[in-house]
């Protein structure tokens, strides 16, 4: 075992001895493994690399037992290197470049392969079936076509399979065998159809399942509720239909933090039983950390959240055919950061929503909600976005705290609402008569009072405008502290999920 290793930094055109490697390696590999056993070629963010073909791997590194090649986040163009002869290559990271062409053969020793966000095309080659050491496979954001190779079911060590945002078609014909290691499965943004394979129940280590934006059909896969480690379930933008049956499990989906069933054809009442039993959403803290590409919809605008910490929990059941009222049990999910029930429901807003102390955005728009806005919602001091528009709500809008910052667009389409910020005042908003000092002339005081009111109004408008600008520029506290996000227009509903280690 040698005690030094070479670090090739293409940006500075020199070889530098390093003490600790800058690469964050996949799970199961310690930095000591790299320092003493591996040679590493790291050129991430080296903007001076226009073409991958200009780069040749030094012979002394090619001959070593194991090494890593990291060229992520450059401006690399052209076809990829012929890599099949690099028998010692363990990790290849080419994500976020402009490489193109079909996938070539990979060395059988590779266990981490990442080409996210390039321009590769063609079918996934059959040669990939011979990579028995493969544990992490990231092919998302390319133009891969064809079907999902059935041989993936033979990879007993495969932990991450990310094929999202390609042009794959056909059904999910893979049979997931018992004892597999799969923890992340992302097939979102393709043209997949047919039902979900029930063999997914064998993926006991599965933490993230993203099947959004396909054409998958069938009923709600309630049989997934026994996967104790499942944290993220995204089924949005498919053709699922029918009611969500009442769960018979004691603790269904015990680890679930994110569930997105939006843009399907689910019917029947909202799944009140799940709201009562989502154990992970009831806790103040979670032991897990994960990162996720996921799209959230706020006020009709999609935001792509790029980085999410363990404190993030959300429910999105919007744009289905649910009916009935919101269960009082929703108030027990105190870990929730976001809740979207728009385009679905009837009834009243339950007062127990005031118990959602961590809630930061709430969308109940375009429903048939009646009654008033509960005063208890004023106590949601982290609430930064609320959308109650286009319902049949009545009565005064609550005052104080966060409610003093929400604009007219949060309440439009509710003809029975009154009070700030709407132009329609409430009957009990009549100001008390002004007591004039004996020596003052009323006309003079009224003139000064009008000036005071105008000053108050201008300050209010400035405050609301500043708040709106802060949100539009991505500066609300929950976006700054939790996520890096970019705004996208409604309708493009792609989403990505990746594991909790840097890719």
Image (cartoon, rainbow, N blue to C red):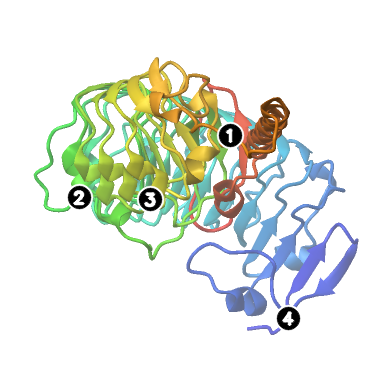
- Taking depth in this image into account, of 427 and 283 the one nearest to the observer is 427
Total numbered circles: 4
Image quadrant where residue 288 sits = bottom left
| Mark sitting earlier along the chain (1/3) | 1
x, y percentage for residue 284? Answer: 36, 61
- Taking depth in this image into account, of 190 and 267 the one nearest to the observer is 267
Local secondary structure at mark 4: loop
Which dot marks residue 197? Answer: none
Which dot marks residue 155? Answer: 3
* Residue position for label 1: 141
Q: CA distance from mark 1 to mark 4?
A: 37 Å
Q: Residue at x 73, y 76 (%)?
A: 5
Local secondary structure at mark 2: helix
Q: CA distance from mark 2 to mark 4?
A: 53 Å
Looking at the picture, does residue 362 appear above or below residue 191?
A: below
| Mark sitting earlier along the chain (1/2) | 1
Which residue lies most toward the right here?
Answer: 13
| Mark sitting earlier along the chain (2/3) | 3
x, y percentage for residue 262? Answer: 36, 28
Q: CA distance from mark 4 to mark 3?
A: 34 Å
- Count neighbours of disc 1 (C-alpha within 10 A) and say few if under 14, some if 14 to 19, many if 20 or more: many
x, y percentage for residue 419? Answer: 46, 27
Question: Pointer 1 and pointer 2: residues touching (CB < 8 Å)?
Answer: no
Which dot marks residue 4? Answer: 4
* Residue position for label 2: 277
495 displayed left or right of 246? right
Res 29 seen here: yes
Q: CA distance from mark 2 to mark 3?
A: 34 Å
Q: Nearer the viewer, mark 1 or mark 2?
A: 2
Q: Residue at x 33, y 51 (%)?
A: 206
């Amino acid at each position: 075992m040698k005690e030094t290793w070479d670090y090739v930094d293409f940006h500075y055109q020199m070889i530098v001895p390093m003490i600790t490697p800058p690469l964050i390696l996949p799970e199961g590999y310690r930095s000591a493994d790299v320092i003493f056993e591996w040679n590493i070629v790291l050129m991430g963010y080296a903007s001076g690399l226009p073409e991958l073909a200009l780069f040749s791997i030094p012979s002394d590194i090619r001959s070593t037992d194991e090494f890593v090649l990291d060229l992520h986040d450059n401006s690399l163009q052209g076809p990829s290197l012929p890599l099949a002869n690099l028998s010692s290559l363990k990790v290849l990271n080419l994500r976020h470049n402009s490489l193109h062409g079909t996938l070539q053969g990979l060395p059988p020793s590779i266990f981490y392969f990442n080409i996210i966000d390039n321009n590769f095309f063609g079918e996934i080659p059959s040669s990939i079936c011979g990579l028995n050491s493969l544990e992490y496979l990231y092919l998302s954001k390319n133009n891969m076509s064809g079907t999902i190779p059935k041989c993936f079911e033979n990879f007993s060590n495969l932990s991450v399979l990310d094929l999202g945002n390609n042009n794959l078609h056909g059904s999910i014909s893979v049979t997931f065998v018992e004892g597999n290691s799969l923890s992340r499965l992302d097939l979102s943004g393709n043209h997949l159809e047919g039902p979900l394979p029930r063999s997914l129940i064998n993926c006991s280590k599965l933490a993230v399942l993203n099947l959004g934006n396909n054409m998958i059909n069938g009923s709600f896969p309630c049989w997934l509720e026994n996967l104790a480690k499942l944290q993220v379930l995204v089924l949005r933008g498919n053709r699922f239909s029918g009611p969500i049956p009442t769960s018979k499990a004691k603790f269904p989906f015990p680890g679930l933090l994110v569930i997105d069933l939006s843009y399907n054809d689910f019917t029947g009442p909202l799944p009140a039983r799940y709201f009562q039993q989502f154990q992970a959403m009831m806790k103040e803290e979670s032991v897990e950390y994960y990162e996720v590409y996921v799209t959230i919809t706020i006020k009709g605008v999609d935001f792509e959240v790029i980085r999410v910490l363990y404190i993030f929990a959300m429910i999105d059941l919007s744009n289905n055919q649910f009916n009935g009222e919101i269960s009082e049990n929703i108030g027990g999910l105190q870990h929730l950061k976001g809740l979207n029930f728009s385009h679905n429901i009837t009834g009243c807003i339950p007062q127990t929503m005031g118990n959602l102390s961590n809630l930061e955005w709430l969308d109940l728009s375009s429903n048939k909600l009646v009654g008033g806005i509960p005063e208890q919602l004023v106590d949601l001091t982290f609430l930064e976005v609320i959308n109650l528009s286009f319902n049949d709500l009545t009565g005064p809008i609550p005052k104080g705290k966060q409610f003093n910052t929400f604009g007219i667009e949060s309440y439009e389409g509710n003809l029975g609402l009154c009070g700030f910020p709407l132009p329609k005042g409430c009957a009990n908003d009549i100001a008390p008569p002004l007591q004039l000092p004996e020596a003052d002339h009323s006309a003079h005081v009224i003139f000064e009072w009008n000036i005071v009111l105008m000053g108050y109004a201008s300050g209010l408008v400035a405050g609301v405008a500043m708040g709106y600008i802060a949100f539009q520029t991505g500066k609300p506290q929950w976006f700054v502290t939790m996520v890096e996000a970019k705004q996208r227009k409604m309708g493009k509903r792609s989403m990505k999920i990746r594991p909790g280690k840097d890719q």
